Image (cartoon, coloured by chain):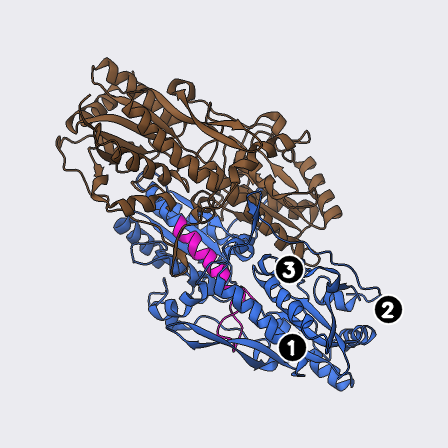
Chain colours: A blue, B brown
Amino acid sequence: MAKQNAFYAQSGGVTATINATACAVIETARKHRGKIGKVYAGRDGIIGALTEDLIDTSKDTPAAIRALRHTPGGAFGSCRYKLKGLEENRAQYERLIEVFKAHNIGYFLYNGGNDSADTSHKVSEVAQKLGYPLVCVGIPKTVDNDLAVTDCCPGFGSVAKYVATSMREAGYDVASMARTSTRVFILEVMGRHAGWITAACGLAADAESEAPHVLLFPEIAFDQDKFLARVEDMVRRHGYCAVGVSEGLRWPDGKFVSESGLRDAFGHAQLGGVAPLVAQLVKDKLKQKYHWAVADYLQRSARHIASRTDAAQSYAVGKAAVELAVRGRSGVMPVIVRKSQKPYKWAIGVADLKDVANKEKVMPRDYITEDGFHITAKCRQYLEPLVQGEDYPPYKNGLPAYVKLRNAAVPKKLNTPFKI
Amino acid sequence: MAKQNAFYAQSGGVTATINATACAVIETARKHRGKIGKVYAGRDGIIGALTEDLIDTSKDTPAAIRALRHTPGGAFGSCRYKLKGLEENRAQYERLIEVFKAHNIGYFLYNGGNDSADTSHKVSEVAQKLGYPLVCVGIPKTVDNDLAVTDCCPGFGSVAKYVATSMREAGYDVASMARTSTRVFILEVMGRHAGWITAACGLAADAESEAPHVLLFPEIAFDQDKFLARVEDMVRRHGYCAVGVSEGLRWPDGKFVSESGLRDAFGHAQLGGVAPLVAQLVKDKLKQKYHWAVADYLQRSARHIASRTDAAQSYAVGKAAVELAVRGRSGVMPVIVRKSQKPYKWAIGVADLKDVANKEKVMPRDYITEDGFHITAKCRQYLEPLVQGEDYPPYKNGLPAYVKLRNAAVPKKLNTPFKI
């Protein structure tokens, strides 16, 4: 196979370690100069390919690329843009091939969640049908940890470490103040459909008396009375109660709790924020003083407290993706395989994209205690290795020194507009 | 002076480094065994003294006490409990002296904010009037950084480092997603009356294009139109806009913005959360997609990213307090003095408690830009040294290993009830 360029794009919500994957892709490609020319990144993800807005990563120094390893966010921009079905919008796929052809791109590396695996799979099919040789490799990433096949998802271990650490720290705070002040603390975390991040909060509790005392999973319908009784019991027994709640908590009728309550002064529904609603319940029904926090983007960008395991895995999947690509493996995705539990050992395996595409892995029921309010020993055993090790970024002037790339544009060759 | 015991209590909201001060108090007292017998801590702060609920810190090992240096929260419990004026409630002060007498306490070390400085000052006066020799030393602590005389407050540097780091990280996240998703991000931080923590968010921006683009201080009345115009301008110029907002933001009429809007389904006012209100404004008026975070207790308990400077200063004031006490200095508080700006050098000075009591240091107007939306170079110069250096806690199983003390009770001698 003649030397061709590679296209790399980041997709969907970014993570603290997706740039470690980008770093690995670029560094590994530079080691295969015989097969891979340049790595072009899509500016703002796949939109960059559709609009022929490509970034020439060779314009950045090896030191800058290396610094990606410890920089959160998506260095080339990401997007929430799902390509439609093949029949619905063949033009999009054909446009991708047109752009790839114009820029001599022979490798398509797509870094994202289950949507992205689906897109990679479809692009691979279209390329084949159009007779354009294109090696398509998906690369896993998502803080939600909800991808099929892989044991865990790059990006998750770091958000898990962040929420568990934050819950532990807040627990120490609330415990100190409970005598005369706040007795109930509520931390809202991400994970709209899968409770993995909520579960990770549970790692903070080494004993039943420790924070968090209650977890509210998206997988378990919210039973208000049972919840309030549990909170009351915890306050009585331990002096305070710390709660971790998923943004995706639902009422028994399936509606999101976050969408059920607050109105602004004009009666408009207030969007987002299940924590304040749960807090209001605690105040109205239990008359307890509360505090609540919403970690939001802080949790998924907290590179300062990344898991060393996660950073290593995020790098490894990027490296493996390029190695698969140069071997001509298409329609696949490197995944993380748990080889042993104690001591924890992992390796990179290979999954077919079609087995990952559009599937969602929620928490197994036996990872949640019978009462629905905490994690089981089995869940803890699964989660614990993923937060192991620290991987601190360098600091300058007291703050993490993150890199901003040049992101120089590749001169356009087609120069034809494409409406996205 | 014969050997006497010391009483130490934590007061008000706890911080990531107040236990470093406790560590210093106990370790330093152990070096002055000729003058100080035991260090008794108040369980849940001053309430512990009033109810004769004292903790014998000698029951904990030197290693456990050492671990306080890197443990957030208040190890002995704190409280929000302000002693009333002398004339109003002399009984409280007399009770304190009664308990101190019963337990041979000759040193009163009170670790808190301006309320606590006031209490220490009053206790010192009452002891004198009652002819009970008691050395009263205040020890500064508050994330709000609003104490008079001292250049900065122990606890502030660490919250400053946390909010600046979080803002920088979230900025990288939002910048990546702005093309198709969130364009406005709002982080709510503490500081009900003084904007120091809000100002610290500003450290994240090395250039005008970087997050945060807008700061909303409690010292500057909220001008909704000017704010919206600024956000719109930033989104136009930089693609996104990150906002740091104080929980204490007020409308021009002086009312808290946080209390002005949301109602639950029954029309009850929703308490707390200025970030969702500002976000709603952005959505309604600018039609921009937003995300918001409320750091709440996470910011003041984030020992995992404490400032090394702050940790050192927090330890130093505890050590100095004991050294002042054994020299018989009463009615004073050790403070931090800035000796030089570049390189940053600091030393411990001594202030009179009456000069600190009940005073509040808000941001000087020339620390805020003329338009009211950011910090000036002068402010940055003041803040920067305070976040210098990292001071990581040890980790176990991937999470910070914080200590829980035994907190063994001192046998009661009075055994008389006291209603608090």
**Residue in the picture at 57% in, 67% down:** A315
User: Do the residues marked 2 and 3 share a common chain?
Assistant: yes
Q: Which mark is residue A137?
A: 1
**Residue in the picture at 80% in, 65% down:** A419
Amino acid type at mark 3: Gly
Q: CA distance from mark 2 to mark 1?
A: 25 Å
User: Mark 2 Cα within 10 Å, few/some/many (few <14, many 20+)?
Assistant: few
User: Can residue A62 be seen in the rendering of this structure?
Assistant: yes
> Which sits in the foreground, A304 or B264?
A304
Asked if the magenta segment contains residue A157, the reply would be yes
Quarter of the image where the C terminus of chain A is located:
bottom right
Vertical arrangement, residue A49 with respect to residue A1, above or below: above
Tell me where the magenta segment starts and ends, as one range. A142-169
Q: Earlier in the sequence, mark 2 or mark 1?
A: 1
Instruction: Name the residue that disc number 3 marks.
Output: A74
Q: CA distance from mark 2 to mark 3?
A: 26 Å
Asked if the magenta segment contains residue A367, the reply would be no
**Residue in the picture at 42% in, 51% down:** A186
Amino acid type at mark 2: Lys
User: Mark 3 Cα within 10 Å, few/some/many (few <14, many 20+)?
Assistant: many
Secondary structure type for disc 1: strand
Side (left or right) of B99 relative to A28: left
User: Mark 1 Cα within 10 Å, few/some/many (few <14, many 20+)?
Assistant: many
Q: Which mark is residue A413?
A: 2
Q: Chain of mark 2?
A: A
Q: How many marks?
A: 3
Amino acid type at mark 1: Val
> Which sits in the foreground, A53 or B402?
B402
